[in-house]
Amino acid sequence: EVQLVESGGGLVKPGGSLRLSCAASGFTLSNAWMSWVRQAPGKGLEWVGRIKSKTDGGTTDYAAPVKGRFTISRDDSKNTLYLQMNSLKTEDTAVYYCRWYDTSSAIDYWGQGTLVTVSS
Amino acid sequence: SYELTQPSSVSVSPGQTARITCSGDVLAKKYARWFQQKPGQAPVLVIYKDSERPSGIPERFSGSSSGTTVTLTISGAQVEDEADYYCYSAADNNLVFGGGTKLTVL
């Protein structure tokens, strides 16, 4: 059974940093295309960024609002995806979800999300 | 950049058919997906590739596409189907989301 469990959210001051984790089970993370998506309170969903599978180059792409501040990485030995968030702004306040897109079936799976609050 | 437009709310009585539309230029060339989101729960994919249903999703959920509009249909909606529904699609190397539709079944 596929499971994605996010953690690491919390309250942080503007300008601070936070690292989110997404523990994956039921599939091999190194073979996966993984994304982070966020949802601000009362707002719609926004794609944050993506990391391709190792076989597809393992490259990353980011949305314009977070480029240069956020970094996606993974630890294959722990089957865990990360989102390092630096220079946080109040507008980064949101629930952050990780998502796995299974390229073989075209089905995607989502975690339950973790809340990040950026406030002084 | 691409945009997807959904109605903010749809309301039906139990047993009726609920239809939620999603419109956007990107849908003319990319598949749409739909997920269901209940408060405090992980999003659940209910339709992919416009009309495919993942295993475990009830048959009352179906999807269709016509031009730049896709439609999620819930035939014989149940009280447990009350949730927010989002359409989304892959475009320009990222994901584009609709604003979400709150489905009320009562």
Image (cartoon, coloured by chain):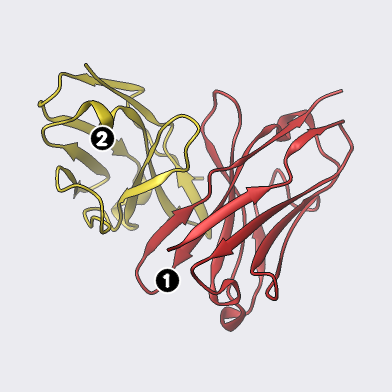
Chain colours: A red, B yellow
- From the viewer's perspective, tell me whether residue A89 is left or right of residue A108: right
What count of labels does the image hold?
2
Q: Tell me the residue at 72%/30% (across/down).
A: A91
Disc 2 with disc 1 on a shared chain: no
Disc 2 is placed on an element classified as: strand
Question: Vertically, is A100 above or below B11?
Answer: below
C-alpha separation, residue under disc 2 versus residue under disc 1:
26 Å
Q: Are marks 2 and 1 in contact (CB under 8 Å)?
A: no
Q: Looking at the image, can residue A21 be seen?
A: yes
Depth check: B91 or B77 in front? B77
| Disc 1: host chain | A
Query: What residue is shown with label 2?
Result: B21
What's the mark number on residue B66? none
Q: Position of residue B52 (x, y in %)?
A: 23, 57
Q: Residue furthest front?
A: A1
- From the viewer's perspective, tell me whether residue A10 is left or right of residue B13: right
Q: Position of residue B26 (x, y in %)?
A: 37, 50
Image quadrant containing the N terminus of chain A = bottom left
Q: Tell me the residue at 51%/45% (across/down).
A: B1
Q: Tell me the residue at 30%/55% (across/down).
A: B48
Q: Looking at the image, can residue B2 be seen?
A: no
Q: Amino acid at mark 1?
A: Thr
Q: Position of residue A92 (x, y in %)?
A: 72, 35
The quarter holding residue B56 reads bottom left
Query: What residue is shown with label 1?
Result: A103
Question: Vertically, is B71 above or below A48?
Answer: above
Specify few, some or many for label 2: CA neighbours under 10 Å numbering under 14, 14-19, or 20 or more: many
Q: Residue furthest top?
A: B106
Q: Tell me the residue at 39%/46% (across/down).
A: B44
Question: Vertically, is B55 above or below A92?
Answer: below
Q: Position of residue B99 (x, y in %)?
A: 43, 31
Q: Amino acid at mark 2?
A: Thr
